[in-house]
Image (cartoon, rainbow, N blue to C red):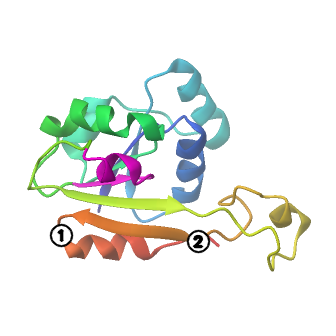
Amino acid sequence: MTVIAMLGAGGKMGVRLAANLKGAPYEVLHVEISEEGRQRLRDATGFECVGQDEALARADVVLMAVPDRLIGKIAHSFIAKVRPGTAIIMLDAAAPYAGELPTRDDVTYFVTHPCHPPIYNDEVTLEAKNDFFGGVTAKQHIVCALMQGRKSIMRCARASHG
């Protein structure tokens, strides 16, 4: 079974991702540094967090649900702790494009970014029509880019919400 370490699991995107991955055929290890974020994750999903070092040691995939401006800094803080072949997925292209990611040729860097639902869309429920940021009840599309690494990671990116 694929093991995902989700960094920032108690943040806005982390909680959404945790909820959407509930019941998925992956083992998700939720990592959150703040007590407030850990409580937010518990309240929203019932999930508990694990320590970052434990999650990174077991991870096949590291999913960075962290603020965009911190992606490079956070990646540098953990890159030595991941195994060769680990896929690192981030939710914004600015850090890799700006060259802020650590150099490590034996990992995969994959970028995906959710698109906001269109204002005029084909949603049929009021709840979905009012999900302006998407990913909860509205259909949500994503854009993806393999920045470095194995093309086989693309299999993981084919799932979408909605």
CA neighbours of label 1 inside 10 A, class few (<14), some (14 to 19), many (20+): some
Res. 89 visible in picture: yes
- Tell which residue pokes out farthest to the right in this image: 126
Q: Quadrant of the N terminus?
A: bottom left
Front-lying residue, 3 or 120? 120
Q: What element carries label 1?
A: loop
Residue at 53% across / 39% down in the picture? Answer: 47
Near-viewer residue (116 or 39): 116
Q: Position of residue 16 (x, y in %)?
A: 60, 49
Cα distance in 3D space between marks 1 and 2: 23 Å
Question: Is 12 positioned to the left or the right of 84 in the image?
Answer: right
Left or right position of 97 against 118: left
- Is residue 23 visible to us here? no
Let me know if residue 9 is in the magenta part. Answer: no
Residue with the mark numbered 2: 141
Q: Position of residue 107 (x, y in %)?
A: 15, 55
At a point 48% along the width and 37% down the height, the residue shown is 67
The residue segment tinted magenta is 87-99
Q: Quadrant of residue 37?
A: top right
The x, y position of residue 144, in whole percent, is 41, 68
Residue drawn at x 32%, y 53% is 97
135 up-or-down from 160: above or below: above
Most foreground residue, 64 or 9:
64
Q: Please determine whether, in this image, residue 140 is positioned above or below residue 47.
A: below
Question: x%, y% of residue 123?
Answer: 81, 75
Residue located beneath label 1 in the image = 150
Whether residue 92 is in magenta: the answer is: yes
Q: Which residue lies furthest to the bottom in this view?
A: 122
Relative to 28, is 105 on the left or the right? left
